[in-house]
Image: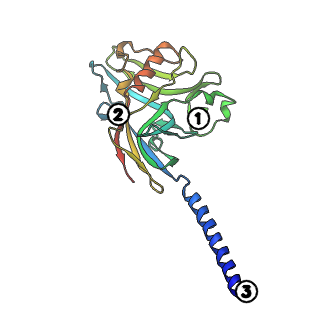
Amino acid sequence: MKSHSSSLLLASLLTTAVAFSGCKRDGDSQPTVGTVSLTVTNVVGTQPLALDGTAYTTASGETFTVSTFEYYLSNIKFTKSDGTTYAAPNEYHLVNTAKPASTSFTISNVPTGDYTGVSFIVGVDSTTTKGDPLALTGDLNPANAMHWAWNTGHIFLKLEGSVTSASPSKALTCHIGGYRAPYSAIVTAAPSLNGATLLVRAGQSPKIALTADVLKIFDGPTKFALSNFPTTMMPSAASVQVANNYANGMFAVKQIQAN
C-alpha cells in the first residue's frame, strides 16, 4: 500500500512539474520589447541651423536667414528585413529648433528584433482633427502655435525668416499643412539606414541620429528660387510641392548607435 501511495504521489508531482514547465515556456515565448531613441539635428547644408540671424546660401547663390523652424514627426514605423513592420501608436512629436529638448525623444515598447528601415509622417494624420482641438494635449495642443483652426488642423512644418539676397530683403514664410485632396500635404519620409541594422533588445535603447536639412525645402522634385519662393500660409498646390520636397531628402540618418 505504501509503495502504491508513493507512486501516486510521484506521478502527481511529475504532472505538476510538466504543467508548470509548459506554462513557463508559454510565458517565455511572449515577445519582449525595447526602446528606440531618436535625435534630430537641424542643419543647412553642412552647417548647424542657428536662429540668430546667420545668413545661409543656396546652391544658386541666394542668401537667407531663419528665425523659426519646427515640424511634427508622427506615425513612426520600423521595418525588419523580412518586410514585417511595427508602427508605434500615438506618437506625435513637435521638433522645435528653439527648444533643444524637443529634438530628442524615445519610442517605447518596440518589439525586439533586427530592423533595417524607419519611416515617419512629417506632420500629423487626419485623426487629430476629430473632436475639440482644445482638448488636445502635449505637442498637439494648439497653444504651441502649430494649429490653424478647428476645421483646418495642424501646421505640419513652419519655416520663417528673411530672404537677404533680395533688395530689399523680403519675408520667407512657409506654413505647410492640409489633409484634403487636392492639397493634402501628408507625406512620409523614409531615410535610408545606409546598410546599418537597428538592433532592438530588451533593456537596451539604441539611437537613430537624424539630420534635417532646410535646403531640401527649396531643392527637391520642385526647384524653388528664393526670389520667387511662394508664401504658403494655407493648403495650396505650392504647399504640396514643398511637402514633396522635404519628404524626398530633408531627413538623413547620420548614425545608428547601439546602447
Report the residue that reaches farthest toward the bottom. 2
User: Residue at 43% of width from left, 37% of height from top?
Assistant: 118
Residue 252 image point, x, y percent: 36, 34
* Mark 1 or mark 3, whichever is nearer to me: 3
Q: CA distance from mark 2 to mark 1?
A: 24 Å
* Snapshot quadrant of residue 58: top left
Asked whether the beta carbons under mark 1 and mark 3 sit within 8 Å of each other, the answer is no
Residue highlighted by disc 1: 140
Question: Label 3: which residue?
Answer: 1
- Of mark 1 and mark 3, the one earlier in the sequence is 3
- 6 with respect to 154 (left or right): right
Q: Nearer the viewer, mark 3 or mark 2?
A: 3
Q: Is residue 4 left or right of residue 167?
A: right
The reply to whether dot 3 and dot 2 touch (C-beta < 8 Å) is: no
Q: Residue 148's spot in the image, x, y percent?
A: 59, 24
Q: Residue 43, which numbered label?
A: 2
The front one of 105 and 197 is: 197
Badge 1 marks a residue whose secondary structure is helix
137 left or right, relative to 83: right
Q: Position of residue 17 (x, y in %)?
A: 61, 70
Query: Which residue in the rendered view is the most extreme toward the right?
Result: 1
Disc 3 to disc 2, C-alpha distance: 85 Å
Q: Residue at x 42, y 43 (%)?
A: 115
